[in-house]
């Protein structure tokens, strides 16, 4: 099969910005900076916004940015990007301080921290991206490990009942996804953060159609009026989990890369962070093994009780 050449008419990587930001050089015009929440902002960043096409209003959810976060850019692209780039074949999403690190694929770390001023030195590895996408693969952020399942993590960090509501909606609207939901949310401890990806446009449209159908139903069922500002970002948090569920169910060939995390604060201690991730992953595997053994012996006990009861009834 002849390899397709990666050119700027066929791939765009959204870079979500909500304020003036340092952005990397973009000589190949592959990055597409997009202002998120433009409809509720008093600042015009001077590039593509998530509520317009070439200055004209378009289908968007820009006003929901405080709840949907980077997903307002996702929605804009889903509904509008082919109107501007009709030949687009691949699409991605990064953040103004989060970019894929294509140089450190095989490391254990999911992120590498740098000072924000170093963003200007970031270079997009177009040759590596082209090689990956030619294999019809999807690029996601490397998973961050937790000492417990993603279900427990969500309950710990957010509103515990919300993940139960999400599962119920999956059961009702997309029951064929329930097994993958349980595998990824209940029996897994690794999360692809930031809703970052690069994928074929066909996959993107299928994913968005599924994702926003679920999130729209969540809006109808969960009252967030009394949530804190952080917890009101519920749809962005849920999408981080649902991205992995969709990839698992649809058996996509996913290639994971760590993320460059640019900060105006202190850099991570790589050694300390590495061992922290290692401990958390090990703790989860031990607890999962213990839980599996308990369930196994409990099932054997229950089966034994049923057999004993049946034997007594015969006598």
Image (tube, rainbow, N blue to C red):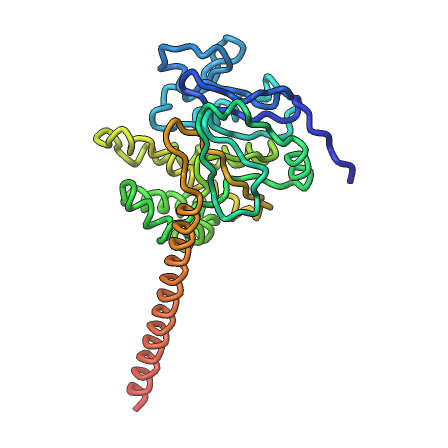
Q: Is residue 34 above or below residue 161?
A: above
> What is the x, y in percent for residue 301?
33, 77
Viewer-nearest residue: 71 or 131: 131
**Could you tell me which quadrant the N terminus lies in?**
top right
Percent position of residue 66, x then y:
34, 24
The residue at the far top in this view is: 55
Determine the image quadrant of residue 211: top left
* Residue 75 visible to the viewer: no
When the figure is inspected, residue 291 is found, relative to residue 121, above or below; the finding is below
Q: Quadrant of residue 238?
A: top left
Q: Is residue 40 visible?
A: yes
**Residue situated furthest right in the rendering:** 2
Judging depth in this view, the residue of 168 and 190 nearest the camera is 190
In this rendering, the answer to whether 118 lies above or below 189 is above
In the shown orientation, is residue 267 left or right of residue 100?
A: left
Name the one closer to the observer, 222 or 296: 296
The tally of labels here is: 0
For the point 51% across and 40% down, the residue is 258
Which residue of the protein is positioned furthest toward the bottom in this rendering? 315
Left or right of 191 on screen, residue 137:
right
Left or right: where 10 falls relative to 155: right
The quadrant in which the C terminus is found is: bottom left
> In this orientation, which residue lies closer to the viewer: 87 or 195?
195
Location of residue 141 in the rendering, given as x and y in whole percent from the top left corner: 50, 40
* Rendered location of residue 136, percent (x, y): 65, 40
Dividing the picture into quadrants, the one containing residue 252 is top right
Residue 270, placed above or below residue 188: above
Q: Residue at x 57, y 20 (%)?
A: 25
> Is residue 139 found left or right of 172 in the rendered image?
right
């Amino acid at each position: 099969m002849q390899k397709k050449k990666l050119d700027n008419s066929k791939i765009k990587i959204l870079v979500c910005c909500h304020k003036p930001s340092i952005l990397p050089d973009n000589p190949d015009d592959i990055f597409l900076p997009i202002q998120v929440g433009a409809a509720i902002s008093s600042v015009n960043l001077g590039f593509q916004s998530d509520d317009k096409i070439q200055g004209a209003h378009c289908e968007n959810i820009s006003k929901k940015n405080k709840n949907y976060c980077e997903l307002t850019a996702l929605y804009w692209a889903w509904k509008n990007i082919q109107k501007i780039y009709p030949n687009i074949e691949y699409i991605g999403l990064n953040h103004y301080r989060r970019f894929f690190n294509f140089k450190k694929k095989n490391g254990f770390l999911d992120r590498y921290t740098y000072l924000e001023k170093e963003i200007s030195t970031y270079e997009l590895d177009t040759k590596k991206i082209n090689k990956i996408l030619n294999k019809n693969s999807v690029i996601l952020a490397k998973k961050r490990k937790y000492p417990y399942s993603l279900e427990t993590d969500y309950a710990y960090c957010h509103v515990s009942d919300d993940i139960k509501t999400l599962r119920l909606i999956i059961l009702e609207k997309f029951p064929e996804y329930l097994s993958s939901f349980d595998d990824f949310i209940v029996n897994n401890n690794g999360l692809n953060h930031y809703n970052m990806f690069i994928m074929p446009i066909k996959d993107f449209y299928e994913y968005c159609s599924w994702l926003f159908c679920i999130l729209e139903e969540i809006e109808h069922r969960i009252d967030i009026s009394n949530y804190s500002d952080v917890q009101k970002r519920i749809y962005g948090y849920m999408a981080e989990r649902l991205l992995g569920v969709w990839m698992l169910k649809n058996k996509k060939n996913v290639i994971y890369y760590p993320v460059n995390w640019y900060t105006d604060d202190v850099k991570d201690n790589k050694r300390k962070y590495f061992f922290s991730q290692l401990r958390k992953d090990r703790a989860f595997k031990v607890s999962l093994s213990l839980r599996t053994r308990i369930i196994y012996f409990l099932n054997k006990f229950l089966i034994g009780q049923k057999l004993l009861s049946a034997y007594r009834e015969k006598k």
